[in-house]
Amino acid sequence: MKKTNYMGLQLDNPIIVAAGPWSRDGSSILRCFESGAGAVVTESIVSDAILDVRPRIAYNGSGAENIRLYSDVQIEGWEREMEIAKSGGGKVIASVSAHTPSEMAYLTAKLQKFGADAIEISISNPYMESLEVMASDAERVYRVTREVVSNVDIPVAVKLSQNTTNIMEVAKAAKDAGASAVSAINTVRAILGVDLEDRKPVLGTYGGYSGAPIRPLGLASVASIAQSVDIPISGIGGVTNYREALEYIMLGATTVQVGTTMMIEGPQAVRKIVEGVEAWCSHRGIESIDEIRGSALNNLRSFEEMKIEPAISTVGSTRCTDDCSKCMQVCLYDAISKQEGKITVDQKLCTGCGLCTFICPSRKLKLNW
Ligand SMILES: Cc1cc2nc3c(=O)[nH]c(=O)nc-3n(C[C@H](O)[C@H](O)[C@H](O)COP(=O)(O)O)c2cc1C
C-alpha cells in the first residue's frame, strides 16, 4: 500500500500508537514500533514531571479508566529518550501538555531540537479541570496553538476532547491558528464504577474513559469535524481491530490511533490492525487509504434529512430455526411472532424502528431504508 501522508510526514501506514504510558520513554517507544505502526505518539511531556498517584489505571474487560499523569521523564531527559526512540527509524510525534501558551511553546521548541518529527498538543485531560476548560475554549486553543506553531518548524496537531459543547468550533480554532491536523478524541470524563461494600468509586476520583465503549463517541467526533473543518484528522478512541480503524477512515480520518488495545494486548494486537487494514485494502485493489477516506460521509445525513415516514420491514416472514426469541422480546410494537420455525412481521404493526435487525444473532431480519 502507498504511504500515508499525515501532516507532511510520510507514514508506512495510517495506524499510530496513541499517547500513553506504553510510550513513556525511548525504549517503550521502540517496543511500540514492534507493532509496525506508522508512527508513535509519546506519553504527554510536561515541564515539571510529577509523582504519580496510586492506583491510576482500572479496567473492566471492555473499557479502562485512568488518572495516569504525564511522562515522568523530565524535559531535558527527552534528549536521550528521543534519540533512543528514533534509533529504529520510525516517526515519533511528541505529545506535550502545559497550562500556558508560553510553557507549551518552550516544551515544543525543545522537543523539535531533540528530533521529534511532529508535535501533538494535549489540551484535554478529563481529570484535570483546568485543561478541560481549555479544551472547550476555542479562543484559548487558538492562542496556545498559535504560540506553538510560530515557535517550531515541524507539523503541529491539536488533540481535542469530546467533553466540550462544540468540538467543531475548537477544531476550527486549531486550524485557524495554523495546526496541521487535529486528533480526536482524548479519554472521556468518567467513573468506571463504585465498590458497594467500600462505597468507593473506582480510582477514588474522576478519570478518563478509554477503550471500545468510547468508539461511538470518537467516530461521531471525527465525522462532525470532517464535515465542517477542512483539516487532516487523526481518529482515536476504542479501536480494537482493523475494521474499526477503517470505520474511522471512512468517516474522514487520515490516520487512526490505538491506545487501550496497545496497553491491554501489546504490540501484536496493533500489528494485527496494521496488517488487517492492508489486507482489506489489497483484496479490493485499494492502493492508497486516500481512496476510501471519508467515503461513508456521503451516507451520513443530518437528522433533518432523514426520512420521517416509517420504513417497512422487507421481511414479511422468514424461516428461523434458532432457539431464541430475542426479536419478539425486543419488539416494542408487538409486530413479530413465530410459529413452526417461521418468523412473521406484521406489516401493519411494524413501524420500522429497526431494533430487531440489530438484535437478531443471525441477522435474518432486514429493514428496507
Ligand atoms: C493509561 C492511559 C494514559 C494516557 N495518557 C495520555 C497522555 O499522556 N496524553 C494524551 O494525550 N493522551 C493520553 N491518553 C489517551 C489516549 O492517547 C487516547 O486518546 C485514549 O485512550 C482513547 O483511545 P483508546 O480508546 O484507543 O485508548 C492515555 C490513555 C490511557 C488509557
Image (cartoon, rainbow, N blue to C red):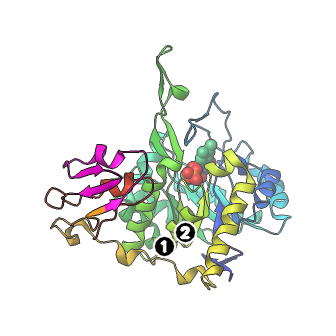
27 up-or-down from 3: above or below: above
Residue 338 spot, x, y in % from top left = 29, 50
Q: Which residue is mark 1?
A: 250
Q: Are marks 1 and 2 in contact (CB under 8 Å)?
A: yes
Residue 334 spot, x, y in % from top left = 20, 48
Image quarter in which the C terminus is found: bottom left
Q: Nearer the viewer, residue 344 or 307?
A: 344
Residue located at (61% from left, 64% from top): 242
Crowd class of label 1 (few under 14; some 14 to 19; many from 20; radius 10 Å): many
Can residue 243 be seen in the rendering of this structure?
yes
Q: Which residue is mark 2?
A: 246
Which amino acid, by three-letter code, is at mark 2?
A: Leu
Q: CA distance from mark 1 to mark 2?
A: 6 Å
Residue located at (67% from left, 74% from top): 279
Can residue 338 be found in the magenta stretch?
yes
Kindly tell me whether mark 2's CB lies below 8 Å from ligand 1: no
Can residue 93 be seen in the rendering of this structure?
no
Residue 203 spot, x, y in % from top left = 55, 28
